[in-house]
Image (spheres, rainbow, N blue to C red):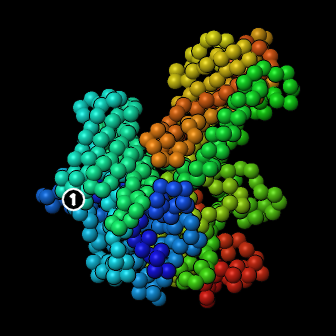
Amino acid sequence: MMWWRGVMTGACLWMLAGLAQAAGDAGARVVFIAHAVTRDVSTALPLRQWTYATVSSSADTGDGLQLRLRPVWARAPDMPGIDSLSLDDRHAEDRAMRAVLASGFDVQARPDGAVVRPVDAKAWQTLAASQPDERLLVSTRLAALALRPVMLPTAPQAGHAIVRHDRTGDFAALETRMQVRTIDHAIAVLDLEFSGAGLRGHGRQAVRLHDGQPLEARLYLERTPAGADAPQVHRLHVVDMATEPTLDLELDPGQAQAYVESVEATLANPPFSARTDDPALFKLHPTPEGALEPWMPAGQVPATDAMLVFGLKRQPHNPRLIITIGADGRAIGKAGPALSEFSTLRVRDVALLDHAGRPLTGAEATLVQPTVSMQDRQRVDETQLMFPFHLPHDVAAETLVAAHTIRMTGDGNVYRWDRAETVARTAQTMHAGDTRIEWTSPHRAALIQPYSQPADRQGRWTTAVPVDAAGREIPSALVMVWRSLDIPGDWRTPAAIPALVLEAGRVPHRLEIATAEPIAGLRLRHYRWHTEPRTWTFHDVRSRMNDADRATYEREFGPSGATAR
């Protein structure tokens, strides 16, 4: 256990320097960091670490900004059962680790460098005594590069160069060369190169245009430790969770590449690459005009909302109980096949409530995943990356047992039919100015519309069906391309580093259309959407069980002496 504790400590520390951009925020923001380390530049499997942390401003000392960094969850995904939830207070090092995580780190950020100190110095000394080498400090300093704010030039443009020299602090001889890669009204994407101070590497970073605050970065860094004959390689991905990244996809290069290859293979074959008369490849649109698409929630509360449940389960060798949330139609008497309906909530607040509906003291939740989707028979627990919130590290089992419901408040999208519009071949829509049509060939077209921002509270969505000269629908094949089709790279060269989530996810949505008959026009179906306040209530699963099932649950998962409610 000692080895992984050291790995976790390093991962929790490496998020610190250069966090001055958080000082202007009213409250703490949540960042996610993925850090993979290999001992050389070969194809050896990396040691990976994932962490969520909050960053907030605590004071301005006159000599820089005083910030507080508090890791709320950490996990080594290649080592099952190794995460911050498995800390056991029966072991001195685990107690020290929990104390360090719970108190966090103070960061003194100055213009010429940064210093980090654990708030609980005594607990830190306990950990440092068991990890005498400097690898934790090294990983801390490297990851800090991803969070340093950037001083952009006035009116920056693509191609503008920026050079930063570190003269003091962790990298007193490091030179960072930055070049503006792309820029829009809100975000600048930079190419990065690092050299000096025993370090070399490259990366890509997205920063806010008005203040240079980092939103996301990918870094590839090489450093040769003293006495080693090969460099140690660090791959870091750091992202602000307010940008709502798709982490499950981003952290699995194979899944991301499979998506790209699947779409490209579809578009590289008939009927998209060449015309074909094969009727098996075409069909009429399954949704009648004027009706909502199956995935579009209307004003009524989705059935999924009534089947939300949570439960507690034991860990094999740890007293900390693990929360599992999910949806189950059997909780409302739907014992047949799983329902296909799903529900999505953009969460603003999470609270664990007792039997009287009062928030539980000591169980204040930190929201890490702002968008949550639920469908029948789905389960997600605290050890998983996509779990939406995390509790204090020292939350007591008795507190969790007292939870009667878990309440999430937020907003859900609601759709309504707007209108239909026929657009003749070669023409453009007159109703949706931000949507355009590419007329590729007599048998091909593409409908292109912008992505929505996480902060958007209303908007439009458009679908299309091809029609003939008489206005009748033509059977078609459709493919939706919703993100960049760049194959994820291997990071080792600037050209191969994968695109940022913000780059891949901000590309316009493309609906590719192919037909066997000539397309005389497109019948556009316009929908409007807006957000409405919504509350999700997860009920204790035991309250939805019969006596026999409840007894079985208590024996398998419930804490000793727990009673049914």
Percent x, y of residue 291? 72, 33
Instruction: Identify which residue, 283 or 537, lies in the foreground.
Output: 283
The type of residue carrying mark 1 is: Gly
Say whether residue 291 is visible.
no
| Quadrant of the snapshot with the C terminus | bottom right
As drawn, the residue found furthest toward the front would be 229
Instruction: Identify which residue, 123 or 56, lies in the foreground.
Output: 123
Q: Residue at x 12, y 58 (%)?
A: 62
Q: Residue at x 49, y 41 (%)?
A: 496
Q: Secondary structure at mark 1?
A: helix
Question: Is 292 left or right of 196, judged from the image as shown?
Answer: right
- On screen, residue 279 above or below 74: above
Residue 423 location, quadrant: top right
Instruction: Identify which residue, 389 or 279, lies in the foreground.
Output: 279
Percent x, y of residue 179? 33, 36
Instruction: Identify which residue, 308 or 144, lies in the foreground.
Output: 144
Q: Residue at x 31, y 39 (%)?
A: 178
For disc 1, the marked residue is 169
As drawn, the residue found furthest toward the right would be 279
